Amino acid sequence: MANIMESASIEDIALYLQREYGIDADSAQNAAQQVVDGFIDMRDKGLIKGWYFDELGHLELLPTESALSIIERQK
């Protein structure tokens, strides 16, 4: 998993949003673009390495080691 940069495309996320929230295709596409833009921003800030769908079909983020260390320090 450490080499994941992006394994859930905008189209995959749009389909997920349609299925989970019952929204139309255009709304799902727009929302998916916003989601991916946010993920890219988080990746550019060094918070995540990527995003993916887990084996249960949930959209997950892959945090960086520095983000994990910050989380651990706050516990």
Image: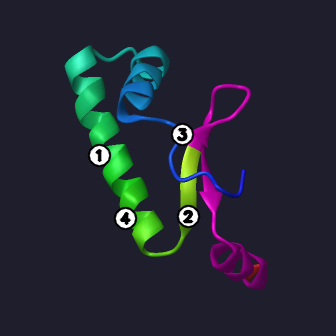
Of the image marks 4 and 2, the number of the one nearer the N terminus? 4
Task: Please rate how many residues cluster around mark 1, counting C-alpha atoms within 10 Å: few if below 14, some from 14 to 19, many from 20.
Answer: few
Report the amino acid beneath label 3: Ser
Q: Nearer the viewer, mark 2 or mark 1?
A: 2
Q: Determine whether label 2 and label 3 are within 8 Å by CB.
A: no
- Where disc 4 sits, the SS reads helix
Of the image marks 1 and 4, the number of the one nearer the N terminus? 1
Q: Which mark is residue 48?
A: 2
Q: Which mark is residue 41?
A: 4
Q: Nearer the viewer, mark 3 or mark 4?
A: 3
Q: Tell whether 9 sits left or right of 75.
A: left
User: Which quarter of the image is occupied by the C terminus?
Assistant: bottom right
- Residue annotated with mark 1: 34
Report the amino acid beneath label 1: Gln
- Residue annotated with mark 3: 7
Is the residue 57 above or below the residue 39 in the image? above
Task: Please rate how many residues cluster around mark 3, counting C-alpha atoms within 10 Å: few if below 14, some from 14 to 19, many from 20.
Answer: few
Q: Nearer the viewer, mark 3 or mark 1?
A: 3
Of the image marks 2 and 1, the number of the one nearer the N terminus? 1
Mark 3 and mark 1: span between their CA atoms? 16 Å
Start and end of the magenta stretch? 52-73
Which residue appears at 61% of the width and 51% of the height? Answer: 4
Mark 1 and mark 4: span between their CA atoms? 11 Å
